[in-house]
Amino acid sequence: MKDESHSTTCNLCPHACIIPSGQFGRCGVRENFRGNIRSTNHAMVTALLCDAIENRIIFHYRPGSKVLSVGSFGCNMNCFYCQNYTQAHSWNGIPMKNLSPEEIINHAIVAKMDGIAFSVNEPVVCYEFVMDTFSGAGSMFTALNTNGMIMPEPLSKLLKKTDAMNVDIKSFKKNGYQRLGGNLETVKETIISTWESQTHLEITFPVVRGFNDKRDEIGDLSRWMAKKLSPSVPLHIFTVKPALKFSGPAVSSEIIEALRKEAKKYLDFVYTEKNQDTHCPECGTMIISRKSTPKSGDFSQHCPFFNSVDIIHHDPSCPECGKDLNIANQWFTNSNRQFRLTI
Ligand code: SF4
């Protein structure tokens, strides 16, 4: 939308920035260029590696498959504990490559990837880059890690191109989101729309000591998920490490376990760094065993690094009791496959 002062409104996310000519929106990457919104991070890549889908914190979509993970720069939130601050807000001078969507797809084909994922910085602010890449993905699947801060119309187009999505819900309180420069209601709407679409959905709740580490908050979130979505939607609880303005200490493993127990009252699949295996929620049968090592790399500090995924039962429902496990798409038969090939 343009006005007489040559400002343009960006309607991609709920910030709805009114951007004067030659200026940038709040995310720092979308510019009013001669009256039109231009995305300055299109085809700009700050991270590119072959990865396990589990490292994208997606456990119930084609487990054991490999993805080419792509990161660019920019973000539309301002979390005080940001785990990827350089790519999100301070990218000037960092190494990056100009790679077109076609070149990325070619990398994925050459490296024999099963899918392509956008992660690290916020994919919403790379909207056209993501859409162009996913449009050419062919038989490879497509996946995203996102904060869910996107308006319904662009979301609806994005969902048509995206097979699997993990949405961070960073607080279940309105004032929690205000502190992070986000909007809880928008994120809830994104989650509901994703659940109602054909896109596979998982949710991550990053826990920050003193911010969102009380049982009532995760209890409210889990009850809401069970009621509005389904108890079968996987919830990942992660410990946020000290970073940026969060001086720590990180929340203890005892508190994480208490939060897991609270969420398990309402949900079938609740994962933490110490609970990464998939068991049947009805009879307890082990379905998938996952092993990870502590993270020390540069990609995303709050993701564990999975070095093996052992699929014990290759059925979408429990072999013992028949319970539906909400595991989407085909199973991969190469158990204990080793991952992590950087290109
Ligand atoms: S995507 Fe960026 S420019 Fe557009 S409304 Fe959101 S913060 Fe503003």
Image (cartoon, rainbow, N blue to C red):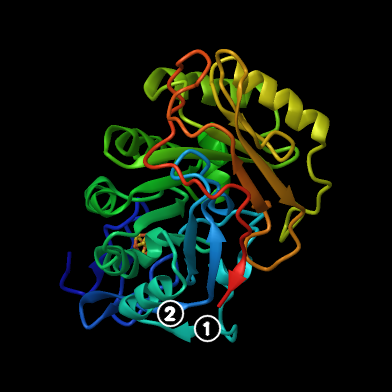
Q: Ligand 1: does it lie within 8 Å of the C-beta at label 2? A: no
The residue under label 1 is 96
Dot 1 lies on which element?
loop
Look at label 2 and name its amino acid: Met
Look at label 1 and name its amino acid: Met
Dot 2 lies on which element?
strand
Quadrant location of ligand 1?
bottom left
Question: For residue 265, what is the image quadrant?
Answer: top right
Quadrant for the N terminus in the image: bottom left
Marked residue nearer the N-terminal end (1 or 2): 2
Which residue is at 61% across, 46% downward?
309
Q: From where the camera sits, is residue 251 visible?
A: yes
Q: Position of residue 115 (x, y in %)?
A: 40, 59
Q: From where the camera sits, is residue 240 visible?
A: no
Cβ–Cβ under 8 Å for marks 1 and 2? yes
Q: Position of residue 254 (x, y in %)?
A: 82, 29
Q: Position of residue 164 (x, y in %)?
A: 39, 47
